[in-house]
Amino acid sequence: EYSKKSEKFKDIPLGYYVYPGKEWIVPKAFGKTRDVLRIFEELTGISYPFNKYDQTIVAGFQEFSGMENITATTLADTEVFFANNPFGASLVEDLVSHEAAHSWFGNLVTCKNWAELWLNEGFATFMEAAFREKMYGREAYLQKIAADADIFITDDAVNPKRNGLFNRNADNVSNLFARPATTYNKGGAVIHTLREQIGDKAFWSGVNAYLNLHKFANVETADLQAAMERAANTKLDW
């Protein structure tokens, strides 16, 4: 059984489904949801693309921390209740912003095949840092990017089974998420590097064009490259 807490972002209903008696976790875990949606709209230049947004905690959700089902994200209760820990609150905030980012990167526009999964997950990871930047400043953003880069570098140093951002091993779907550091953390750091290379104005203009041109359709890395090259008016060496 669930207890539902509700609010709105503009005209969009927001629902938080938690266990009866655990309603106290809603402001701790989900209290910045409206800020997340507002900031992502501002950064992308594209309004939240769906008619509602629900977040539901679920038990026994061991394989993932969250899943970005369109308008109805599910989140592992073990992760969400970590928001009650002072050291875990920022991690839950990252999780909430990550899954919300998929409304744009993964739901509005999604990768053409599993090999291009970094376009979904790398962007959602990068948007965690972008949210931090808007809320807490540039230093918070850089700390998140550096942490993601460190996670990938450490993983890459100790794990011999490597794959590129374009995952040539993606036909093995059962193992696709076994090494998330490349798809998620490296992906986010690479998008940050792209932003630094072409500058804020061109980068966010390219993001807007990329999402608008391919909304409710599928994309490959070449589509992102083309959008960024047009926005920056330069050829990018990928």
Image (tube, rainbow, N blue to C red):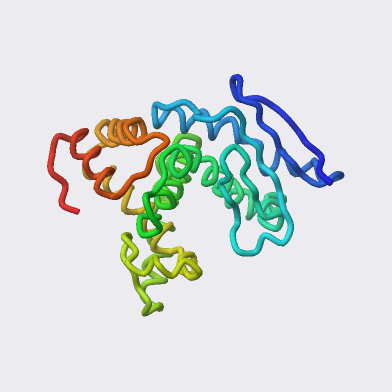
* Relative image position of residue 29 (x, y in whole percent): 67, 44
Q: Nearer the viewer, residue 100 or 138?
A: 100
Q: Quadrant of the C terminus?
A: bottom left
Residue 140 appears anywhere in the view: no
169, above or below 45, in the image: below
Q: Is residue 132 left or right of residue 26?
A: left
* Relative image position of residue 107 (x, y in whole percent): 48, 41
Residue sitting at x 31%, y 36%? 210
Residue sitting at x 32%, y 48%? 191
Q: In this view, does 87 lie to the left or right of 131?
A: right
* Relative image position of residue 190 (x, y in whole percent): 31, 53
* Relative image position of residue 2 (x, y in whole percent): 81, 43
Residue sitting at x 38%, y 55%? 113
Q: How many marks overall?
A: 0
Residue 54 appears anywhere in the view: yes
Query: Residue 118's image quarter?
Result: bottom left
Residue sitting at x 46%, y 28%? 41
Q: Which residue lies furthest to the top in this view?
A: 11
Q: Is residue 152 left or right of residue 58?
A: left
Q: Which of 152 and 179 is in front in this view?
A: 179
Query: Residue 28's image quarter?
Result: top right
Q: Residue furthest right?
A: 21
Query: Residue 62's image quarter?
Result: bottom right
